[in-house]
Amino acid sequence: MRFDIISDTHGYLSDELLEAVRGADYIVHAGDICSDSDYRTLERIAPVRACLGNNDWGMEYGPSVKRVTTFFSAGLRWQLCHYEERLDLMTCDIAICGHTHRPFIKRDPRTRVLMMNPGSPTFPRTAKGPTIGRIVAENGHVSEVRIIELNKRR
């Protein structure tokens, strides 16, 4: 299963972002969606699992979108929280965060939990430019983890 990971879209879904996530089995959004219509646009592409960001006040994404969102898929326990420091790494296999607009992939040295911040496709704060993440997993095994630089996809 292919999970495309995004965060900090801040009310703007570029054509390049929408093209990149086509074909995903799930879209995972780590907060600051900032637009009910953008959330619905993503849902038309693939099922969305999302958490609330600090700029998502007043939005109506539905009852499954919380400050901390957990779900089970591909044999793995996922946790999403906009803030890295609020992730509970004792309760998940994969932890996704956002907020900083700076992408990273790492394993927690204590728990061995796979952690990702996909950066931002809208307002990047690194020289990498606009980014998203991708995780491919099945039956409890992760076979691919990467950050995709949208402006270098061609």
Image (cartoon, rainbow, N blue to C red):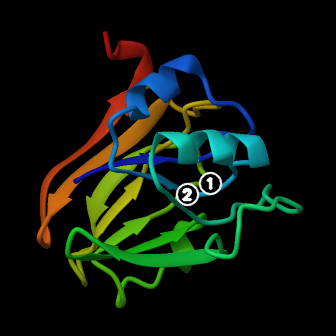
Q: Amino acid at mark 2?
A: Ala
Q: Position of residue 64 (x, y in %)?
A: 61, 74
Q: Position of residue 98 (x, y in %)?
A: 55, 55
Residue at mark 1? 99
SS category of the residue bearing label 1: loop
Q: Position of residue 40 (x, y in %)?
A: 66, 46
Q: Nearer the viewer, residue 29 or 38?
A: 38
x 24%, y 83%: residue: 110
Indicate whether 45 appears above or below 12: below
Mark 1–mark 2 Cα distance, whole angstroms, equals 8 Å
The label on residue 118 is: none
* Quadrant hosting residue 90: bottom left
Work out whether residue 127 can be spotted. no
Seen in the image, is 20 located left or right of residue 58? left
Q: What is the crowding at mark 2: few (fewer than 14 residues within 10 Å), some, or many (at least 20)?
A: many
x 35%, y 14%: residue: 152
Sequence-earlier tag: 1 or 2: 2
Work out whether residue 66 can be spotted. yes
Q: Residue furthest front?
A: 44
Q: Are marks 1 and 2 in contact (CB under 8 Å)?
A: yes
Q: Position of residue 15 (x, y in %)?
A: 55, 18
Indicate whether 121 appears above or below 65: above
Q: Which of the image's four quarters has the N terminus?
A: bottom left
Residue at mark 2? 30
Q: Nearer the viewer, residue 152 or 135?
A: 135
Which mark's residue is nearer the viewer, 1 or 2? 2
